[in-house]
Amino acid sequence: METAGFGGGCHWCTEGVFQILRGVSQVNQGFLQSTAPDDAWAEGVVVRFDPEIISLDILIEVHLRTHSANSGYSPNGRYRSAVYFRVADQRHRADTVITRLRQKVDSAVRTKVLPLVGFRSSEERYRNYYHTDPTRPFCQRYIDPKLDAIRRDFARHVLSEGDAGR
């Protein structure tokens, strides 16, 4: 099993995106911290995954295609577009994937590759946000379109409806 972090907009959306992927065993929503100058706590998730089932490359591509953190809106760095690595090999793989996708995915241009040095869980009431009530207006407006895109573009990596959000 491997662990990596992802930040790019609201952690409610990011959590929902990774929860529907085959090979992802755990998604912890909260705030991630890196080293200076990117040491402000930023919304994101830490994902535990089986690289035999889903590669870090696929996770990064899904991430880049499902957030729009390239708009520049980021109060106090809270919505940093980033892939957070735990080990040096992940940094190299993330840099390679982002470079490869740069032509196809606009958000790749602003996405940073950063060491993950800290994690704080979000409040319990916000965890598993999408799956506790997908009928919320926020979920329908922002998360559903991302999940639809993943089901369309990454179908072979998506869990069956009954298994998603476990």
Image: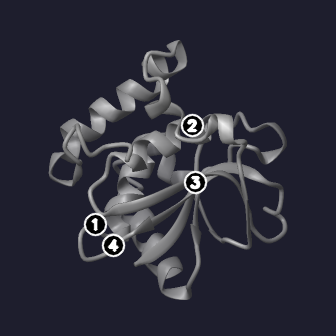
Instruction: Say how the picture is coloured.
Output: one colour
Sequence-wise, the earlier of marks 4 and 3 is 3
Q: Using the image, tell me which numbered label, if any, was put on residue 54.
A: 1
Return the x and y of residue 79 as percentages of the image width and height.
69, 43
Sequence-wise, the earlier of marks 1 and 3 is 3
| C-alpha separation, residue under disc 1 versus residue under disc 2 | 22 Å
123 left or right, relative to 49: right
Query: Residue at left 54%, top 19%?
Result: 138
Kindly identify the amino acid type of the residue bearing the numbered disc 4: Asp
| C-alpha separation, residue under disc 1 versus residue under disc 3 | 17 Å
- Residue that numbered label 3 is attached to: 45
- Residue that numbered label 2 is attached to: 12
Kindly identify the amino acid type of the residue bearing the numbered disc 1: Ile
Return the x and y of residue 13 as percentages of the image width and height.
51, 36
The outermost residue toward the left is 156
- Judge by depth and name the residue closer to the eye, 65 or 11: 11
Return the x and y of residue 53 as percentages of the image width and height.
24, 69
- Residue that numbered label 4 is attached to: 50
Kindly identify the amino acid type of the residue bearing the numbered disc 3: Val
Give the crowd class for mark 1: few <14, some 14-19, many >=20 residues within 10 Å: some
| C-alpha separation, residue under disc 2 versus residue under disc 4 | 22 Å
Sequence-wise, the earlier of marks 3 and 2 is 2
Give the crowd class for mark 3: few <14, some 14-19, many >=20 residues within 10 Å: many
Q: Is residue 84 above or below residue 160?
A: below
